[in-house]
Image (cartoon, rainbow, N blue to C red):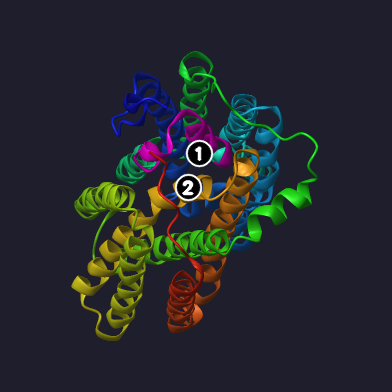
Amino acid sequence: MPKSDRSPVFTPLESSSILSLSSIMFFRMFGLFLVLPVFSILAQELDSATPLLIGLAFGGYGLTQAILQIPFGIWSDRIGRKPVIMAGLLLFIIGSLIAAFADNIYLMIVARLLQGAGAISSAVFVLIADLTRPEVRTRANAGIGASIGIAFGGAFFIAPFLGSFAGLSGIFGLISLMATIGLFILWRFVPEPENSSRSSNTPTLDMIKSVLVLPSIRTIDFGAFVCSTGLSAVFFMIPIQLAAQGWISSELWKIYLPMLLSGGLIMVGSAIIAETKNCFREVMFVGVGFLIASVLCLNFFHEFQHKFLLIAGLFLFFMGFNVFEPLFPSLVTRLTNPTTKGAASGVYNFCQFMGHFAGAAIAGIFYSANIHFLLSFLLMINLSFLFLLYKDFQNPAPPQK
């Protein structure tokens, strides 16, 4: 490969690919994050709604996402990334439209399950790997991660205002529109990869086993579960606790905006350091340290009820979470061969979305009954991740010059 092809600067094709795929993820994830701060309140207006059924509707998206990540990832290895992403976006749009017209909780559950059936995350991250060189891939993933982070911050700021005058119907109508824009971007602007290896004959279980035998991949997959479990649990707890401290919805941007900015700086900095120095393992140790410190702050908050500890716990968690956001997808594609990248990404995303589901479920069960058990559980899985990181993870070999 010529020297110019090894440049750490993005090529025009890479820049176009990153921008278009980041836009798709932004439009899709912005719509999803709009639901998080308001769904449990607005869903009470649906016919036959009960706390249990509202919880099933809220968590149903993550459940079907988790179940279908591996099939969608393997499917993308076999027929190509773009057709799989297109099919997933269509399912997501149909589910969103059903949710917009749902007038009872049972139809909302069906809609949320159908939304989750559009499990495109693994295919998107593997398509980024197909369209970028290894030496810029972590920064490419950071670009997608940044778009998700911006979507997260913007949605949390807008959702309370939008929900107050548009309700769930208006929110899901907007989600449908944004996903449709993402579908157009995919069709019009995302290029086809020149060299995309596919596997059509390898049995599915063999493809899964081929990635799970790698200790570093198992560590990353468990880390994805830990981070996502923490994300769901923390953002189940924090809004309730902020409200108890006197914060109203219209003022939460004062917390979320600085949190977003600090998380973004950590994301970009950790990606650049890990990539240029090939010290992924060392950077991830720092990330786990943030997560553990976050749990300790939240535990001390429940002992002393000082709001500084609550906000510090939120910031530390988000900073730790953002250390891993660009590193995990990049490492999954680096540590597997071209014909199993989709399967590996599917397993990774399965663990990630099972974490989302588990975090919300465990938080819902234990938040009122035994908050210390919930925090102890989060501390235990973070320490387990730290142990696996020390024991089983090795930095990947740097790209050949």
The spot of residue 371 in percent (x, y) is: 44, 80
- The structure residue drawn at horizontal position 34% and vertical position 19%, both measured from the top left corner, is 12
Q: Amino acid at mark 2?
A: Pro
In this orientation, which residue lies closer to the viewer: 377 or 109?
A: 377
* Disc 1 secondary structure class: helix
Task: Say whether marks 2 and 1 touch (CB < 8 Å).
Answer: yes
Viewer-side residue, 368 vs 189: 189
**Kind of residue indicated by mark 1:** Phe
Left or right, residue 373 beside residue 148 = right
Q: Position of residue 125 (x, y in %)?
A: 50, 39
Horizontally, residue 266 falls left or right of residue 34, namely: left
Q: Which residue is mark 1?
A: 125
Q: Which residues are magenta?
A: 122-139
The question of residue 387 being in magenta is answered with no
In terms of secondary structure, where does tag 2 sit? helix
Q: Evaluate whether residue 370 shows in this view.
A: yes
Q: Is residue 162 visible?
A: no
The image shows residue 304 at horizontal and vertical percentages of 24, 84
Q: Which residue is mark 2?
A: 329
Residue 309, how many percent across, how many down?
23, 74
Mark 2 Cα within 10 Å, few/some/many (few <14, many 20+)? many
Which residue shows up at 44% across the image and 29% down it?
21
